[in-house]
Image: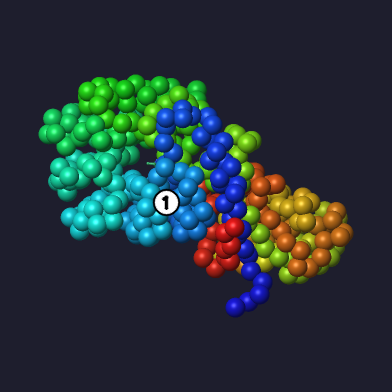
Amino acid sequence: MTTHSAELIVDSSKIISNISHLKSLISSDSKFMFIVKSNAYGHSLKEIIKNLESYVDAFGVVRMEEAILVRKTTSKPILLMQGIYTEHEINIARENNIQVAIHKMSQFKFIGKDDNELGLWVKVNTGMNRLGLSHEELKEAYENGIISSDSVLMTHMACADNPDDPMNEMQINKFEKAFDIVERKTKRSICNSACLMNFPHLSFDWVRSGIAAYGGESKNLNLKTAMTFRAPIISIRKIRKGERVGYGGRKKASKDMRIAIVYAGYADGIPQTTIDGTKVLVNDKQAVIFGRVSMDLVSIDITNLPQVSENDLVSFWCEELPINEFSNNNGLISYELMTRISNRVKVKVI
Ligand SMILES: *Cc1c(COP(=O)(O)O)cnc(C)c1O
């Protein structure tokens, strides 16, 4: 093992505080499903489940392996949000008490009467046109008697991050119509994080929140980035005016400068496309990325930070430098930054 490495510190108390803030926005009758797909958005699934289970009502995942891992750690309800595809999978779901979501008619053939006790979730397409039943299909399924008052009617919003988009109202209306089709008997779930924040009155029976709980939702200043992604400086050098740095010599010194080479690159999860000028923090002071990100290294400008020395830690995002700062400046989304951190990065969950 090398001693130097990029590292990820995940602070569960920040997620707990984000969730408590999110809960304060919605009806106290609404239950909170914490979405932990994709390794808890890169935050370490197992530890996150352990640390968060008493603060949420259920966990949502998309893959069976994740569902099973979550089941080994908690007895809370688990929803497999993208359903099941074989008889074998529904059997595993039954054995492990995992709730499943149905998003297309052919999946109903795996579902027996008793599976409703697990709480069957039925997804309707209200305009995102990705997954979900049409109104006609929903009607057919309802008439077949598979959907009951234990079921949860769900949909997913495409544009909830922009409250002015007319798509929102259209989807909300279509969801209302779907609820009529099931004679307003089922439970309802429509909100992801953006919907929860912009349309909190739609929290209904369940909200399904991921990104906001991790602090990656940009519009709310009460939410804290729960990850600190950082790496040590392994070398410092002075360069002369006119010298160029890194692959492609992309950045040229406009004056004599001092640059630091940081031990993290795109193989750790810093996008190769990161632009010059992207902010980082060194000892709580701001510096900027200077030159192209390579596989294992990235260079930053520390000309104005004479006290910075080797082994000092450089944070790419953390509570004080929100992850959205990095993603917005680079035309990316926080979800992608969180989930692309590679497994050679040392992770510590506190
Ligand atoms: C990922 C996911 C969510 C959570 O979305 P966020 O934007 O992270 O809150 C909610 N519902 C479904 C079906 C999802 O796949």
Q: Is residue 249 left or right of residue 82?
A: right
Residue 236 coordinates in the image, percent (x, y): 79, 67
Query: Is disc 1 surrounded by few (<14), some (14 to 19) or many (20+) residues within 10 Å?
Result: many
Residue 184 coordinates in the image, percent (x, y): 26, 24
Residue at the image point whose x is 78% and y is 56% from the top: 283
Whether residue 251 is visible, yes or no, is no
Residue at the image point whose x is 26% and y is 54% from the top: 93
Number of marks present in the image shown? 1
Residue located beneath label 1 in the image: 37
Q: Nearer the viewer, residue 152 or 198?
A: 152
Q: How is the image coloured?
A: rainbow
Label 1 lies in ligand 1 vicinity (Cβ under 8 Å): yes
Whether residue 234 is visible, yes or no, is yes
Residue sitting at the far left: 144
Residue at the image point whose x is 46% and y is 43% from the top: 56
Residue 14 coordinates in the image, percent (x, y): 60, 47
Q: Nearer the viewer, residue 78 or 110?
A: 78
Q: Nearer the viewer, residue 188 or 233?
A: 188
Label 1 element class = helix
State the image quarter where residue 233 is shown.
Answer: bottom right
Residue sitting at the far bottom: 1
Q: Is residue 56 left or right of residue 316?
A: left
Q: Quadrant of ligand 1?
A: top left
Quadrant location of the N terminus in the rendered image: bottom right
Residue at the image point whose x is 50% and y is 58% from the top: 47
Quadrant location of the C terminus in the rendered image: bottom right
Q: What's the amino acid at mark 1?
A: Lys
Residue 242 coordinates in the image, percent (x, y): 82, 59
With respect to residue 283, does 211 lie above or below? above
Q: Nearer the viewer, residue 253 or 23?
A: 23
With respect to residue 240, does 186 lie above or below? above
